[in-house]
Image (tube, rainbow, N blue to C red):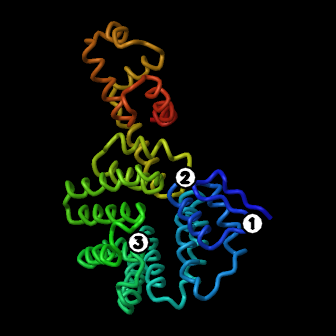
Amino acid sequence: MVVSLLTLSVPPVEGWPTHDELLALAQHARVTLDRRALCIVHHHIDDVPWSQDEALQLFLTLMRLAFATTSVEGEEEGVLVFARAALAASGNAWASGYVEAMKSRVYFASGERIAARTHFEAAVDHILSVDPDTICPDAWLGLAEASIPFDLDFAGDAVRKSESTRAASHDPAVTRSHRMVIRGRLAEALGQRADAETHYRMAWDVARADGDVRTGIVIGVQLGLLTRDGSAWSYVREHSRLCHPSWWPIRALAAEDMRRAFAMTPAQRDVLARIRRGASNRAIAAETGRSVSRVRDIVAELFDLFGVQPRTRAALVTTAHRYEPINESA
């Protein structure tokens, strides 16, 4: 059987993919949310024999696959892949710690704080039982993220460990941007909003420059929630078609859309309705008795409200159309 990967940004493969090619494809699926790459890894990961020495490579492949699957196919499907990664982690302390850290995050997100803390403590026990220099940077960052609700000092230490384990310049861009996201979340938890925004924007620049759509979406939501940055929400909205509606950033986008839909003032609703009928600023001013400069101000408010770049009215009308059923029910 021949597997064609010509459409992907990895070398084409003739025959069955190798372990390294599956790992690269899983990473590609994770950052770009490429459904084809995701499908190939799902289809072939059990067809390639994995030896005992390759157990960690299988584990990392499955972890990347779990991230991609959650984003593209939904959280339930992602959990199934994650459970397979947990089986592959057995026998390795830091891999088991990484799994426990991810479980802690899942439980915390669902409101089960006791279970989340139990898994967090299990993760710490696993990680502290091995030489810290042998631990994958991603595992340190996963542990840092799980630590934030329970122990900010430990979270900071884990981020620093992720840097000292391997020279930061050797880490892939996805690891560097993830590290900056964790630093941003730490700053937010400490009430340092300016520092949090700085870290998020640095991470966003790295993610977008590297084509890491998944991280870009996550950071876009973090920035949007922290600063009400319209361009961040616009980025998330632009790429939301790649994602499953149950993934938490897309749920956050839906909540933001609802908030924006109900936030329009009567003047904004009136001007938007006239824009959608094709009226110019001057015509709207004449029809409503407002000055042209006041109409321009209201139009600028609408661009900002809907998170649309102020280039063309067509973009504003297209985006506003998504909110129409909500506005009518309001």
- The residue type indicated by label 2 comes to Cys
Q: Earlier in the sequence, mark 3 or mark 2?
A: 3
- Sequence-earlier tag: 3 or 1: 1
Viewer-nearest residue: 18 or 218: 18
Give above or below for 72 relative to 279: below
Q: Position of residue 114 (x, y in %)?
A: 39, 80
Q: CA distance from mark 3 to mark 1?
A: 43 Å
Task: Report which residue position mark 2 lands on.
Answer: 243
Q: Quadrant of residue 138?
A: bottom left
In front: 278, or 11?
A: 11
State the separation of the CA atoms marked 3 and 2: 22 Å
Residue 319 in the image: x percent, y percent? 47, 32
Q: Earlier in the sequence, mark 2 or mark 1?
A: 1
Instruction: Find disc 3 in the rendering and name its residue.
Output: 108
Residue 23 on image: x %, y %: 57, 69
Q: Amino acid at mark 3?
A: Phe
Give the residue at x 72% y 63%.
14
Q: Residues within 10 Å of mark 3 (few under 14, many from 20)?
A: some
Secondary-structure class at tag 2:
loop
Vertical placement of residue 299 versus 104, above or below: above
What residue is rendered at 21% in x and 57% in y? 195
Distance of label 2 from label 1 (alpha carbons): 30 Å
Neighbor class of circle 2 (other Cα within 10 Å; few <14, some 14-19, many 20+) is: many
Q: Which residue is mark 1?
A: 15
Identify which residue is drawn at 23% across, 63% down: 187
* Label 1 SS: loop
> Quarter holding the C terminus?
top left
